[in-house]
Image: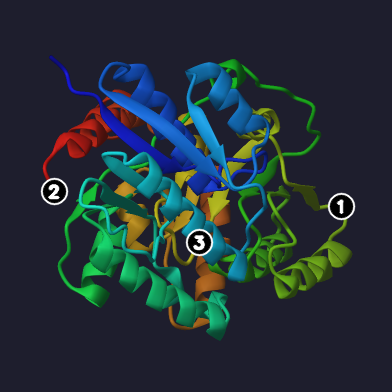
Amino acid sequence: MILIIHLIVDIRTIDEKRSGIGQYTESYIRNLLYRYPNDFSIIGITDKKNKLVESLIKDLGIEVIEYGKKVFRSITIFKYFSFVKSEILKRNPDIFWEPNNIFPHSLKNKNTKLLVTIHDIFPITFPSSYSFKYRFYFKHAVRKTINNADKIITVSQKTKYDIEKVFGNKKISVIYNIINFEPNFMSISDEIYQDDFFLFLGNFEYRKGVYLLLPAYEQYLENGGKNSLFIAGNINREKKARFFLNKFIEKYPNKIKIFGYIDEKVKWQLLNSKRCIAFVFPSLAEGFGTPPLEALFSGRKVIVSNIPIFKEILEDFPIYFEIENDVMNSIKNLSKALFKSETLNKSPNNFFEYLNNKFSTEKLIDEFATELKKEW
């Protein structure tokens, strides 16, 4: 007889403009219940229901507990955590899974195990992108979370290494992100774009390497480059970065095209366009890095920085440029990579075999289910 494992999962990051964590949470919930419908039951808990949460309820038949108020990075998050804790004590699940890095509470319930997914600890390892107040809060909260958790999952060996370097050896298992390739959008190969272009997709912020991208692109143009630069994602994440972007738009209005936040259809439309010469992702720090994998899947050439996470996730498939202590040298290296991408053939054919071996959804879900069934 199979004993069903009952979970409560914090799903507040699943919304219309879901982040990487929201996509991660939804993917694991859906695929876990599709693959193991008789082994697990899930109750979601969130701040405010939305269309994506309603689709989870409809598609999977799960119950979702609603706090009733939208929470942000402020005092409201503590009230939300207290609400979550009270529901856990009331419903007594086998596992409470917090996939959003932090749950700084002791459950005080011997029957419920605390599982936490930590995607990165950037406020500690890459502090320049965060306020002092948030860095202080994060370090305190993540330390408390790690100490209270019965099990920690990270989405990369790099994040596991960072946690153990800062906090010491912990009960950490590495299970990669599920990569969702939308089958309905795979055949989109529009030719609605008039120019050949480089594509950047992501939040437009310092950590994503945008202060390298724009000057490197300018060098590319000054040295005879012809391709346009398309930028898709949230361009209002950092005021300084937006101001920096505006200066380049004013200088090159016919070469830089801004899309802002885009849906899945437009994303795959851009990635599958034959006009896309290369996908450029010059990030300085990543917990995982899904967009370059999606670009390689689409047959695009990919340019990334030579940071450890990309070596782990992408191995030898992309074009790497070196990040140096001298910013001008890093910019020069990226500019050279833009030119290099024009002369290379498409991404290697054996990428699909690599993708299936390392990031198979079935493999990752089996690893996750195995962890849930272990005695912690």
301 and 223: which one is in front?
301
Q: Cα distance, mark 2 to mark 3?
A: 35 Å
Q: In this picture, is 26 found above or below 288? A: above
Residue 125 visible in the displayed image: no
Q: Secondary structure at mark 1?
A: loop
Pointer 1 with pointer 3, Cβ within 8 A: no
Identify residue for label 3: 283
Identify residue for label 1: 254
Amino acid type of the residue tagged 1 in the rendering: Asn
Label of residue 227 in the image: none
**Residue in the image at 45% along x and 40% along y:** 25
Number of residue marks: 3
Left or right of 69 on screen, residue 335: left
Identify residue for label 2: 376
Q: Cα distance, mark 1 to mark 3?
A: 25 Å
**Residue in the image at 67% along x and 70% along y:** 215
Q: In this picture, is 181 found above or below 328? A: above
Quadrant for the N terminus in the image? top left
Q: Between label 1 and label 2, give the one nearer the viewer.
A: 2
Q: Secondary structure at mark 3?
A: loop
Task: Name, please, the residue furthest toward the front.
Answer: 90
Please state the horizontal and vertical placement of residue 132, each as a whole percent of the image: 54, 85
Give the colouring mode of the picture: rainbow
Q: Bin the neighbour count of mark 1 within 10 Å (Cα to Cα): few under 14, some 14-19, many 20 and up.
A: few
Amino acid type of the residue tagged 3 in the rendering: Ser
Question: In the rendered structure, which disc, 1 or 3, sits on the residue that comes first in sequence?
Answer: 1
